[in-house]
Image (cartoon, helix red, strand yellow):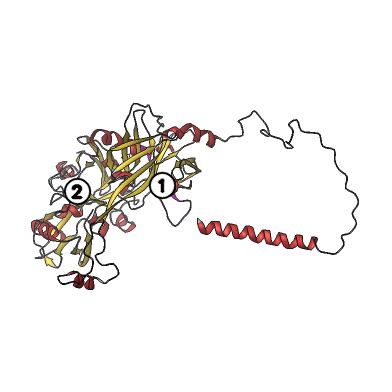
């Protein structure tokens, strides 16, 4: 900002200097040419002494000069909040600042002569800011997980200047949606939630929030696109907008022209000025009741690994398009397998519809399954060999199956990498053409887990972990558990092998 001000100031001074040069010519010692006397117009004296200008709207009644955006901003302002947080950070001070580590160790050891000893760790508060909006009169507020996760204190500032302490009610990192609450008997102004599915690219929208600490900043634009996938996880379905969104807008509302919330401002493209992204409010509606009741979200699971239908695959499978989700693996003991192969669930099947909703791409299936109530029997339309059939699959809770997070808790085995693995049996060996190779088959991945982000795919066979062979899932578990922050895996894929380094999740 400082540089911008300097440039603007430089331009102003440059103009002033040029203006002064021109004036100096006019003010030179040369005699000025004679001019005829100017005629002075008669001016009617103003009604108010000292005022010589007109006031009021150009036309219409007073107040009509305000735009619909201005009126909307006034109407919703009481329900939009600034979220101020603080977090305690501990810093280990250097024992001997300015000395290389080896010299520090040498001089700091026994016999060090008069040098300072290690100081106590220093703790200090790191402040941060975001935005949010009230969704119920009893103080429930929506914001982003990255605004409030891991903080020590949350203070909510309202548009009337009042402040309140808030607490976290629930977090869903997979969608970056958080629910917090301010306590007290004061009735809060709740915003209405709209219908993000009804939006069309080109619709006008308004973003209001706290960018760079500039509270209740209003920006205006359009919906640039829908269904954007940013690689943040399997539930990516962002609204793209050119309404200016900046750091500090996170968690604030994206509104339609009726004042209803249709999105939660979440992300920006740092290389552009007018590319921002918001989580659709309909996605939030699916999970907010769970966040309020349980503090977290339980998602559905059907026990299949799917892949994109490429043009080559579509041709090989005699498909007329690349739409749908191709089943690459059916998890042993999972819901899909329980539906029975004879009834139509097998590798190579194409999922075209789930619970009455068309599946055009992988993310359509991920979002539909995740939003389905656990325990619901769902019709799934499958395509195989030119024929379609419908099977019923009982949706189970994600991570509740027999293959759930092998290794258990985060920081342990394969589960900490987002892997589900199983020992190789004769059928798998034959299917994967492994011969007498030893290894462990990857049967399923968490789509946004560390292994998936590193490039591991369902159907891969892990041959080594940290350069040591693995012959069983149990052996892989122990190798991963003993690894540090990352583990080097040797993976067989098709007829080739490759090394993939996987960093353990936070």
Q: Nearer the viewer, mark 2 or mark 1?
A: 1
* Neighbours of disc 2 within 10 Å: few (<14), some (14-19), many (20+): some
User: Rounded to the nearest whole Å, what is the CA distance between mark 2 and mark 1?
Assistant: 47 Å
User: x, y (%) of residue 208?
Assistant: 46, 41
User: x, y (%) of residue 157?
Assistant: 40, 37
Name the residue beneath numbered marker 1.
248
Q: Residue at x 64, y 28 (%)?
A: 61
Q: Is residue 167 left or right of residue 336?
A: right
Name the residue beneath numbered marker 2.
346
Residue 1 disc label: none
* Neighbours of disc 1 within 10 Å: few (<14), some (14-19), many (20+): many
Residue 493 versus residue 79: which sits nearer the camera?
79
Give the SS element for disc 1: loop
User: x, y (%) of residue 183?
Assistant: 31, 31
For residue 404: magenta? no
Residue 396 versus residue 18: which sits nearer the camera?
18
Give the SS element for disc 2: loop
Q: Is residue 480 left or right of residue 254?
A: left
Q: What span is in magenta?
A: 271-282
Residue 15 versus residue 137: which sits nearer the camera?
15
In the image, residue 112 above or below residue 77: below
In the image, residue 113 above or below residue 315: below
Q: Residue at x 66, y 33 (%)?
A: 57
Q: Residue at x 50, y 55 (%)?
A: 1
Q: Are marks 2 and 1 in contact (CB under 8 Å)?
A: no
Residue 358 in view of the camera: no
Disc with the residue nearer the chain's start (2 vs 1): 1
Image quarter of residue 18: bottom right
User: x, y (%) of residue 16?
Assistant: 68, 58
Residue 421 in view of the camera: yes
Number of dots carrying numbers = 2
In the image, residue 15 above or below residue 290: below
């Amino acid at each position: 900002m400082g540089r911008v001000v300097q440039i603007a100031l430089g331009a102003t001074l440059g103009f002033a200097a040029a203006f002064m040069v021109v004036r100096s010519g006019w003010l030179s010692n040369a005699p000025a040419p004679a001019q005829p006397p100017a005629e002075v117009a008669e001016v009617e004296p103003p009604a108010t002494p000292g005022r010589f200008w007109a006031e009021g709207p150009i036309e219409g009644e007073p107040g009509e000069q305000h735009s619909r955006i201005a009126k909307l901003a006034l109407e919703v302002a009481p329900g939009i909040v600034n979220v101020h947080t603080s977090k305690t950070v501990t810093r280990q001070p250097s024992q001997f600042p300015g000395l290389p580590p080896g010299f520090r160790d040498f001089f700091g050891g026994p016999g060090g002569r008069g040098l300072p000893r290690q100081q106590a760790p220093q703790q200090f508060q790191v402040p941060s800011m975001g935005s949010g909006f009230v969704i119920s009169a009893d103080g429930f507020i929506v914001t982003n997980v990255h605004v409030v996760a891991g903080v020590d204190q949350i203070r909510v500032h309202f548009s009337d200047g009042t402040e309140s302490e808030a607490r976290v009610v629930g977090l869903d990192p997979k969608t970056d949606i958080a629910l917090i609450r301010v306590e007290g008997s004061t009735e809060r102004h709740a915003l209405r939630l709209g219908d993000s599915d009804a939006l069309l690219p080109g619709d006008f929208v308004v973003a209001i929030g706290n960018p760079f600490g500039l509270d209740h900043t209003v920006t205006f634009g359009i919906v640039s696109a829908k269904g954007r996938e940013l690689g943040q996880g399997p539930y990516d379905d962002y609204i793209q907008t050119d309404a200016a969104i900046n750091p500090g807008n996170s968690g604030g509302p994206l509104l339609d022209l009726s004042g209803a919330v249709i999105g939660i401002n979440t992300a920006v493209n740092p290389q552009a000025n007018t590319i921002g992204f918001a989580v659709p409010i309909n996605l939030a509606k699916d999970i907010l009741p769970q966040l309020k009741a349980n503090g977290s979200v339980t998602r559905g699971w059907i026990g299949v690994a799917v892949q994109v239908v490429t043009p080559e695959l579509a041709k090989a499978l005699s498909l007329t398009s690349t739409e749908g989700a191709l089943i690459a693996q059916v998890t042993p003991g999972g819901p899909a397998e329980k539906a029975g192969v004879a009834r139509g669930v097998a590798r190579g099947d194409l999922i075209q519809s789930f619970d009455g909703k068309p599946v055009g791409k992988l993310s359509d299936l991920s979002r539909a399954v995740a939003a389905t109530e656990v325990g619901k029997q769902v019709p799934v339309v499958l395509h195989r060999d030119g024929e379609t059939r419908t099977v019923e699959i009982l949706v189970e809770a994600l991570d509740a199956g027999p293959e759930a997070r092998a290794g258990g808790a985060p920081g342990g085995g394969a589960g900490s990498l987002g892997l589900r693995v199983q020992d190789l049996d004769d059928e798998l060996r034959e299917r994967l053409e492994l011969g007498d190779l030893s290894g462990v088959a990857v049967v399923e991945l968490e789509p946004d887990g560390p292994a998936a982000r590193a490039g591991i795919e369902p159907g891969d066979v892990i041959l080594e972990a940290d350069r040591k062979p693995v012959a069983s899932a149990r052996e892989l578990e122990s190798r991963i558990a003993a690894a540090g922050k990352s583990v080097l895996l040797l993976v067989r894929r098709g007829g080739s092998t490759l090394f993939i380094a996987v960093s353990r999740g936070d």
